[in-house]
Amino acid sequence: MSEGYVPPIRLGPDVARAWSLGPTGDAIWDEFPEVRPAMKQLICEGIEYSINANKALAPVEPYAFLVHCLGPYLDSHTGGPSYWGALARMLWRCLRYEGPANESERYNMQVYVLDRFDPGVLRENLRKVDPAVADYVDYIFPEWWTAE
């Protein structure tokens, strides 16, 4: 292993956590350890704002993790199998989330993740690492692939 390597956490969506960042935040934290410093910064900024504004703590919105943490990582890295595998696992977890904000989770995945990619490139790579994820994206967003 190279120095500085941080392996992904394999807790999965059904494991109880002492502190959860929400379905999207937990999936990003688990699958993309490289973005944890950016996530920490976002969380700390939220705490600092709450202190300075004398407001209650509020969770970081899922789109903020996607836009400010994962997005820059996805834009600056192109993928081998580990990149596409992590992306497939995150998509699987977030798109299959069945909680109070499931429509919001799906919207965020489409707008802030899927729309970053050329549909043909994404489909090809998802099929290589996990065809079930590609099929599920097709099922949830049938119109998205037609952009090819």
Image: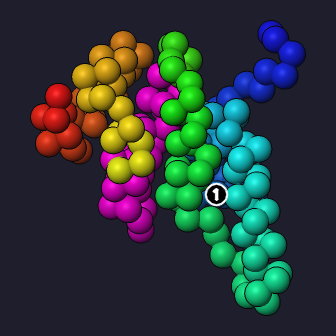
* Residue 37 visible in the displayed image: yes
Q: Is residue 12 above or below residue 62?
A: above
The residue at the point 35 percent across, 50 percent down is 111
Quadrant for the C terminus, please.
top left
The residue at the point 76 percent across, 80 percent down is 50
Using the image as rendered, state which of residue 76 and residue 8 is in the foreground: 76
Where residue 14 appears, x then y in whole percent?
Answer: 56, 47
Is residue 107 magenta-colored? yes
Q: Secondary structure at mark 1?
A: loop
Q: What residue range appears in magenta?
A: 84-110
The residue beneath circle 1 is 21
Is residue 103 magenta-colored? yes
Q: Residues within 10 Å of mark 1 (few under 14, many from 20)?
A: some
Q: Is residue 18 above or below residue 74?
A: below
**Quadrant location of residue 6?**
top right
Where residue 48 appears, x then y in whole percent?
Answer: 81, 72
Residue type at mark 1 is Leu
Q: Taking 138 as reference, is 98 left or right?
A: right
Using the image as rendered, state which of residue 73 and residue 60 is in the foreground: 73
The residue at the point 64 percent across, 57 percent down is 21
The residue at the point 53 percent across, 42 percent down is 71
* Residue 14 visible in the displayed image: no
Where residue 7 appears, x then y in whole percent?
Answer: 73, 25
From this viewpoint, which residue is outermost toward the right? Answer: 3
Magenta segment, prevailing SS (helix, strand or loop): helix
Where residue 134 appears, x then y in whole percent?
Answer: 29, 27
Q: Is residue 112 above or below residue 46?
A: above
Quadrant for the N terminus, please.
top right
Q: Taking 148 as reference, is 21 left or right?
A: right
